[in-house]
Every structure is written in structure tokens, then in C-alpha cells.
Image: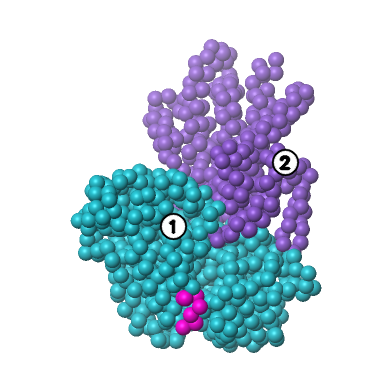
Amino acid sequence: MVRYIIRRLLAAVLLLGVVSAVTFAIFFLVPRLAGASSQDLASRYVGRSANAQQVKEMTDKLGFNDPIYVQYGRFVKAIVAGADYDTGPTTVHCPAPCFGYSFLTQNPVWPDLLDRLTVTGSLAGGAAVIWLVAGVATGVLSALRRGSVFDRAAMGVALAGVSLPIFFTGLLSLSIFSYGLHLLPAGGSYTPITQNPAEWAYDLILPWTTLAFLNAAGYARLTRAGMLETMGEDYIRTARAKGLPGRTVVIKHGLRSALTPIVTIFGLDLGILLGGAVLTESTFSLNGIGKYAIDGINNNDLPKVLGVTMVGAFFIIVANLLVDLLYAVIDPRVRL
Amino acid sequence: MKRRPAVAAVAAGVAFALALTGCNGNKSNPSTSTNTAQAQYNAAVGKVFSASTKKGGTLRFANSGDWDSLDPADTYYGYSWDFIRLYGRALTMFAPKPGKAGTELVPDLAESLGVSSDGAKTWTYKLRKGVKFEDGTPITSKDVKYAVERSLDKATFTQGPTYFNDFLDLQGYTSPYQDSDPNKLGLKAVDTPDDQTIVFHLAKPYGGFDYFAMLPATIPVPVAKDTGTKYKEHVVSSGPYMFDQNNLGKSFTLKRNPNWDPANDPNRTALPDTIEVALNVNGDDIDNRLQAGSLDIAVEGTGVQSAAQGKILADPNLKKNADLASLARLWFTVINSDVAPLDNIHCRKAVEYAVDHEGYQRAYGGDAGGDIATNLMPPQLPGAQKIDLYNFMSKKNGDIDSAKKELAACGKPDGFETNVSFRAERGKEKATAESMQQALAKVGIKLTIKPYPLADYVKLYAGKPDYAKANNLGLIIYGWGADWPDGFGFLQQIVDSRVIRPQGGNSNLGVKIPEVDALVDQALASTDADARNKIWAQVDKTVMENAVILPGVWAKVLLYRPTTISNVYVNDGLGGYYDYAWMGVK
């Protein structure tokens, strides 16, 4: 087991390296292959009325004249060992893992990422709890009462949930609960949990439920399908024949086995969300990883994009690893 | 060009607005000018709405994006130049008056406007006495000089304008950070003979230097507190408010600066106790919050989003809380004389005649987007003269007969083929290209539409002369906003052929007329504002006579004015924004 984990971890590090190299190449190698000079690249990061001299200075400052592998090496070195940056009057050290300085705003990327990660984490974590509980519970109940009014209603709502994009449900719920009824805070409200946990939860209720609504719908349908299949198995009949209570049969025998695909999907979904819940964050004006990524992409701000990509890839890889380990817990057959 | 993100707008009587402006032009204080008590459409255009002297409260701003920088040396957004006056005082500023009266410059940190000598190559300002930084240190001319010095360092402060770099007699000076002078005041182009006096020496004459003195780069910076690129985290205030909290990229708050003295600042009301700014807020959400009263100002001043615009204009109860502001901005198309057969003036004139001007206006939202432009300078600019050489107003859908005559004179009676470029992300520019394609097809001019990515449009494609020529970009769709409302601020960067750089990044996309260059030099040297304005009007006319620019729309935007704010007016000097330095909370 330990060897397995170590092997997976090594593979993860390798994968992160590949992801960073590919992202780096997309930004620096592809434009060059298309014929852009290093000064063309630098001209994106100078002011509107910069002259040739200023473009040249910027090219030197950003090191675009160096060969690609040197630039990439510098990036990797900064992650491992940190780097020094010139602020004008002084030089500041950006400690590892330094994802560099934003080309445009000249802020270090890593503190920004950490700061925004708490927002994205709060959003994704809270929403995940809601959608997992609501989605699985609805799915189980629907499966047990297949064809009932509840089943039909729940699956109808689930279909709507999957179909409606978050920028629709989000704005609609804001306009009803925030601007109409004044029950919930306006978009953009966020209080760190360390400052006031109650306020934190209150501010995030709408984003949580909106995001959960979208995801819960899929989980409900998935759970329902899984449960329907499992509950038809012979061993369920056997369990019932043994005289086990209904609850034990459903939860311990039925749900446990139907849960495996749910856990897989859940791990991936959560990993992806931690890499930035782009639409939710934009709709609710939450300054998380997703908004940060959009900002970086819009401005061709490579260090930001690289930073988000690495963080996103990291979470997806970790989530995958956790899912694989969880399998063993949920499904004893894996341990064999 | 001050960058002003995509503009959505609506239209109605400019004449009405201008007439009202004229009435108020001579009054010194907006609180004494016409006050509209009742909310109505355009109540804050050309006059002050809900005048008030009530202090207190929190003024809440939101931005759908982020500032380029809060550092006075590093900012080039129009709204930023408006907002920065809350925490910084430049030597001069635009008069705090509604409408066109706001285009006049008044002294701010200086006690009077600049005094020129040496044929407009030397400019002297005296600072007001008793003005202090937020920590109580008196502000001296050396702090202003240092601020100008650091703004020259374009490797550190990449985003600000380059007027001081271009005009000061630098003698090789690059940056205070490379300066061997122990006080970091080695720039010879700026003298500080005493603590109240500052003298600027230019390499070439410029009669309108008071406009440069208005730039945020003259907001004083204490050398000991300068942290370079990190200074934006806490700019040391010289205005009525100072930074309280600053969460870069997310939000910031300003509180009262205890060392600001209203006795030596006639230009600001400083009514609210606190200023709150939320950054990166969803644009549609901003509109909803404005209407719900949970937000006071959309700081970018680009107008409401199209969803809200339709709703506001259709509902009289909302419309009465809206203002249609004229921007000092022109949406236009360059007719590229590098590309045959547009090197022939008659072929260019044919394009001017044949275009559907209403179609151009429709592409920008119809009346909502602004007025049909007949020449370059927007009418609210001082000295602007409306001329209509190609029957834009009498034949709004194109003058086919005249166009055909010009085509015949050009030797292309059956028309010709060329390309039209636009910024792919901008739906309005795409609609413009399609409208032109249809209109020009009527006279046999066949247009092929070429979209390019916005971010690199001027740097790598349309703004790079050899690229534009090699790719046959005969028509280049573009837009331009004035850095400040005068002929130089609006015209120079788009018509002076000497600003064209072969490596790209140009804003002049192909106007190369020696006569215009000569006129620009004359205007620069003239210290008489009236004479200068006449020359700029002549520049405008000459460009139109040469048919190298096809004017499209003089832009407007629909601003929503929540019922929560007082002392509201659109200031034409600031380029069509509400004047943030006068606003209060009800």
C-alpha cells in the first residue's frame, strides 16, 4: 500500500511537470513558431504609448530574449528555490514556491493564489457538502419509490438543475433573494471564516446552493440509477431474506455498492472546482481562483495562468489519488 | 489613449445638454448652479442633480474589473484619473463644474495655472502653502519633482502615459532608481528653486502644458515612502481621503485624511466619511445593485450593460434615474492609403460617400450608441467645429451617386476589392464591418471581413504598418478616446504621422499628411488657447479632406444614477464621467 502511494505521488509530480511545460509552451513556444518575436511578446506588457526603447527594456526585464528552456528553467527554479524581483527602489525576495510575478500588475502570484484559494475552497467545500447530501439522498429516495410522485418530481427538478447554467440560476436567485426580498447578501459578499464563521456561511448560502443545485442534480440521477441496479441484485434479496432491517439493507448493502461511481465523480468534481469555479465565482463576484484565471487569460498574464493551472492540476491529481484510496475503504473487493 | 472598455450607450438631445451647459458655464460653484430637485432623465447632464452640502455616510463604488494601478505614476484609465483626485492632488485639474464648463483647467496643488516663458518651453508653477501629506509632512515642490521622475521609469511603471518622457528635456535621465544624486532628484529638466516653486523645461514647445500638469504623474510622492511597484498598496495621500484597507484585486477603502485642509482646496467637497470600492464585480450584478440602491457608482463609467439598458430605457421610473453622457470618444474607420487602390484619394472618397452612416450608428446601438459623426473631434471638445464634407447628414444611408462619380475618377468605375479588419471580441465592430460590407457592395466595392484578437490588434496586426499593408487591410475599424478634451489630447495620437512606429502598437493607423504634421507643430507652440483650438479644427478638416478617416459615431453611454447619491453631474473635462470628487451620500 505504501509503495503504491509513493508510486502515485511520484507520478503526480511528473504529471505536474508535464502540465507546466505544456502550458509554458502554449504561451511562449507557439507564438514564436507563429513568427512572433520576443519583442512582440513583450509589447503586450508595456503601456499603450511605449516606444521601441521601452519595449526593449521590458523584453530584457522579462527575459524573453533567452532560449525557451532557460526561461522554463527559471520558472521551475523559482518554484523550488524562490526568486528575486526588482520593485524599483529595492529588490524583494519571493520565497518558494514562487510562481513568479504577474507581468502586468507586478504582484507575486503565489500569495494571490493562496488568498484566493480560501475563497474557492470555502465555495467548493460548502457546496460539495450540500450537493452530496442532497443529491445522494434524493437519488436513494427516488430509487426506493420508483415511479412515485416524489420520484418524478425529483427527477424533473434534477433535469432542470443539470440544464440551467449557473449564470442564469445565480443571477435569478440573486435578484429574488438579495435584491427582491433582501433576505440574503448581495453578490460579492465574502467574510473569511477566521473572521466570523456565521457571517461566512451567511454570505455563501446563495453561491453554495446555486452551485450545489447544478451538481446535486447529476448526483441524484446517478445515485438513482446505481441504486436501482443494486437493489435488484440477488444479494439484496438475500439480505432481506435474512431478516435484516430495511435501513441496513438500503444503506449498508445497497448504497455502499452504488456509491463507488459517485465517489469517483465527486473526487474529480471537487478537484476541478478547487482549480477554480469560474462561472460561479464570476456570477457571484467572488474573488477566487477561477476569476483570477479569467483575469490572467484576458490579459495574457502568463505567470497567473501558469499558477492557476498548476494549482488546478495539483488538486485534480490529489483528488484522484484520494478517490483511489477511498475505493479500498468503500469496496472491500479492491483490497483483495 | 485612455483606455475605456467597450462602450454601451443610448442617445438623445446633445443640443439640449450643450445649451444647458452654456447657461452654467460662467458660474463658479456647481452648488449654486441650476439644481434639479426632481429626478428626471439627463438630470445630471449639464447641471448638478441633487446639490447638497451634507457630510457623512459611505460612498460605495464597484468595478467590474480592476484598476490598471492605483499608483499615480502607473495609471491610464479615464475613471482612474477621475477617482485619483480623492487621494491625490496634481498641479492642475479640470474645473469641478457640470458639462462643458468642466473642460476648463483650474489650479489644484498649484496656486495658479502655469506661467510659460522661452516660447512655451519653460513652465513655472507655485504650490499652495500649507498643503500636507496624510502624515502631516508639508508638501514641497521636490515631492512633485520626484513623482514626475519616477513616472519616467517605464520599466517599473509600464502603464502610465509617456507625455513627460516625450516632452521633457531629459538629457538622458531614465529613473530615480538609477539616479546617482543622493536625494534622487537628479532630473535636470525639472528645477525646484524653493519649496513652493517648480519649473519644467521642455525639449520642444508645448503651449498646453497645463494639461500635462493635470496628469496624475504630478501628484506628489514622498521619496522616503516610495516602494516602487509596491507603492500602489499604500499611496501616500495628498487629497481628502487616504487608504484605510487595500486588498489588491478585491477591494479597498478610503477614510478621511486628517491633514487635508479644505481651506486650501477649493476643488473638492469631501462629503462622504468613507469610500468603499469593490473590485471584479459581475457587471450585470453591478446594474442590479445600482437599481436596488445597494451600490452607488459603477466606477468605470462605461454605462450599464445591454440587459439593464433595455430595461431602464423602457421603464420611465428607471429612466428618470439615468443620464446619457457624451464621451470624448469617436468610433471610426481608417481608410488605409498604403493599400491600393485606396492610395488614390478618389477611391477613398468613394468609401466616405458610399457608407451607410445610420448602419454604422445602428452597429453601436442606434441612437443608444451615440450620434452620427461627420468629422473627428467630438462636439463637446473646446474649439470643435462640425463639418460634413461627404453629405453624411443629408444622405444618412450613403450617397451612391457621388460615390460612383468618385470611383470613376479613381479609374475603378466597377469598384474594387479590399479587406476590412476589426477586433474579434467586439460585436459592435463586427456589426460595423457587416454594415459597411453591404453598403459598399452597392457601388461594387467588395469587402472581405477580417477579425483579429483584441489584445494584439494594434500591436501585431492592424496597428503594424507592414502587416496591414501586406494583408491588404484597406479599412481598419477602430475607436479613440481623448486623454483630455482638447485638440492635442484627442487628435495628435491619431493624426500625427510622426507617432507611427514601424514595430507596431500604433494608434495612428495610417494618417500621413505633411500639412497636418505642420499644423500639429503650430498648435503645440501656440500658448493662446483660442488660436490653438482653431488650428486643431483645421487639422480635423484637413484629415477629412484627404478622406483617410471615415468617422462613425460620437459615443455616448447610459449611466445609472441611484437615488442614494447627491451632488451628481457629468463632467466633460473628465471625459463623460460623473465627478467623483464632488459626490455625496443622501
| Front-most of residues A231 and A107 | A107
The reply to whether residue A288 is visible in this rendering is: no
Q: Residue at x 45, y 81 (%)?
A: B529
Q: Residues within 10 Å of mark 2 (few under 14, many from 20)?
A: few
Among the chains, which one is cyan? Answer: B
- Write the start and end of the magenta stretch as one range: B522-528
Secondary element at tag 1: loop
Snapshot quadrant of residue B406: bottom left
B434 lies left or right of B261: left
Amino acid at pointer 2:
Val
Residue on which disc 1 sits: B510
Q: How much space separates mark 2 and mark 1, taking CA atoms? A: 39 Å
Q: Residue B302, percent across and down?
A: 44, 61
Q: Residue at x 66, y 86 (%)?
A: B196
Instruction: Please say if A131 is above or below B204.
Output: above
Q: Residues within 10 Å of mark 1 (few under 14, many from 20)?
A: many
Q: Residue at x 46, y 83 (%)?
A: B528
For disc 2, the chain is A
Which color was chain A given? purple
Q: Is residue B525 magenta?
A: yes
Amino acid at pointer 1:
Gly
The reply to whether residue A268 is visible in this rendering is: yes
Residue on which disc 2 sits: A70
> In the rendered view of the protein, which quadrant contains the C terminus of chain A?
top right
Q: Is residue B23 magenta?
A: no
Q: Residue at x 66, y 37 (%)?
A: A20
